[in-house]
Image (spheres, grey):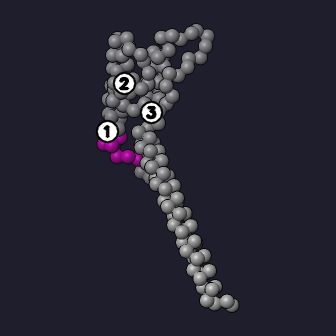
Amino acid sequence: MSPLPEHLQQATRSRTEKAEKRARAALSQLTKAGESISFTAVARKAAVSTDFLYKHLELRPLIERHRTKGGHVPGTRPVEAEPPSASAAVRALSARLSQQQQAHREEIARLRKALEIAQGENLELRRRLAQFDPS
C-alpha cells in the first residue's frame, strides 16, 4: 500500500492542528469562566469529539489536571466525572440494532402464531380425512 499523497497528509495535519487549537481555547475559556471542566464540556465548546480529546497525548492530561483541581482529595486517585462516551456512530448503530432486534422479535411472534394456526388447520383436516378413509 502506498502512503497518502502529500496534499492529503497536509490536510489531515491542518485539520488536527485546528481541532487542537479549538480544544485548547475552549479549555481556557471554561477555566476563565469558572465552569466545571470535563471532556464532554471541552468537546462541546470546541466542536470536537470526546474520542479526539481522550486519544490526544497532550490534551488528555491537561483536561484531567484541570478537571481534578476542583474537589480532589490529595492522596486519592481522582474519579473520572464522565466515562469515555461512545462515538455518535456507535450510538446510532446500537439504536438501529435495537430497533432491528425488536422488529425481528415481533416477526417471530407473528410467524409462530401463524404456524400454530396452520398446524391446527392441518390437524383438523387430518381428522376429517380419517373419517372418510379408515385405512
- Image position of 63 (left or right of 131): left
Crowding at dot 1, Cα within 10 Å, few <14 / some 14-19 / many 20+, comes out as few
Q: Amino acid at mark 1?
A: Ala
Crowding at dot 3, Cα within 10 Å, few <14 / some 14-19 / many 20+, comes out as some
Query: Which numbered circle lies on residue 23?
Result: 2
Residue 31: horizontal and vertical position, in percent? Answer: 38, 13
Q: Is 110 above or below relative to 5?
A: below
Residue 84: horizontal and vertical position, in percent? Answer: 49, 30
Query: Which numbered circle lies on residue 51?
Result: 3
Secondary structure type for disc 3? helix
Residue 23: horizontal and vertical position, in percent? Answer: 36, 24
Residue 9: horizontal and vertical position, in percent? Answer: 35, 40
Q: Nearer the viewer, residue 130 or 32?
A: 130
Magenta-span inclusion, residue 81: no
- Cα separation, mark 2 vs mark 1, equals 18 Å
Locate the C terminus by quadrant: bottom right
- Cα separation, mark 1 vs mark 3, equals 20 Å
Magenta region, mostly helix, strand or loop? Answer: helix
Q: Amino acid at mark 2?
A: Ala
Tell me the residue at 38%/23% (across/down).
42
Front label number (2 vs 1)? 2
Q: Which span is picked out in magenta? A: 3-10
Secondary structure type for disc 1? helix
